[in-house]
Image (spheres, rainbow, N blue to C red):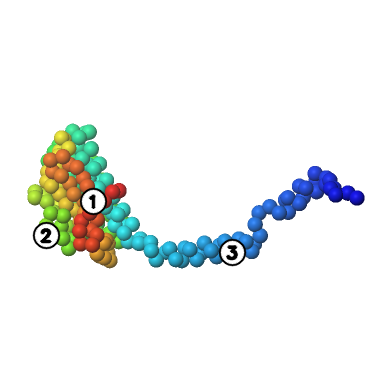
Amino acid sequence: MTLFTSASPNDVTATRSARRGFSAVELLIVCAIVGIFATLAYPRVNFTQFQVDSGARTVRVALQNAERLAVTRQYDVVVSFDVAGKRLRILEDGNNNDLVDNGERVTYAALEDGVHFKIPPAGLSGPVGSAISGSNIKTVDGMPSVVFRRDGAASTDLEVYLASSKELPNDWRAIQVVQSTGRTDWFRYLSGIWKAGSI
């Protein structure tokens, strides 16, 4: 009586290869489970807040880059806010006259779709009358502007307010620039209070 039989190596390989992978039924079950979880999670994802955060990031990065550029290049950099066009204009002002002249580099940073400059329900430092506010806002080519100087300081303290096109209560963002240092911070409006954010 033989208890064990030895199979040839070819028989073992054939048996293993027949069992590799998943069956179609197993794949369908996994896909169905993933689909159910995705359906449950989708309503919890707020794409509007992602857009507004991205818009705040765009403004903050443009302001930080302008400040660094002014220090590095040792001339003024003017950031103007095209409120109607939903974008920022960055002027590398080589002759420090706050105007666009021939040979001076001008770049633009557009806000995300669905995000715009908007007056908030409450400002960071009290009531505000404009989406771009500060104690000494300049007007360059009809746009509110801030100038970053060669020492990194800004021409004004600055608060920039953004909202989604839906203008939901938690969809407001603020970007703040400290005049003396050019430091830039951003905030979220949550439950009626501005809270510092992190990007």
**Nearer the N terminus, badge 1 or badge 2?**
2
Front disc: 1 or 2: 1
Task: Please report whichever mark, 3 or 1, sits nearer to the chain's N-terminal start.
Answer: 3
Residue sitting at 35 percent across and 60 percent down? 47
Residue nearer the viewer, 139 or 135: 135
Q: How many marks are shown on the rendered structure?
A: 3
Identified by mark 3, the residue type is: Ile
The label shown at residue 29 is: 3
Give above or below for 181 relative to 116: above
Work out whether residue 126 can be spotted: yes
Q: Position of residue 13 (x, y in %)?
A: 76, 47
The reply to whether discs 1 and 2 touch (Cβ–Cβ < 8 Å) is no
Residue depicted at x 38% and y 61%: 45
Q: Badges 3 and 1: C-beta atoms under 8 Å apart?
A: no
In this picture, residue 113 sits left or right of residue 122:
right
- Which residue position is annotated with label 2? 127
Residue at the disc numbered 1: 196
Answer yes or no: is residue 83 visible: no
Q: Amino acid at mark 1?
A: Ala
Q: List x then y, in percent, for residue 5.
A: 85, 48
The type of residue carrying mark 2 is Pro
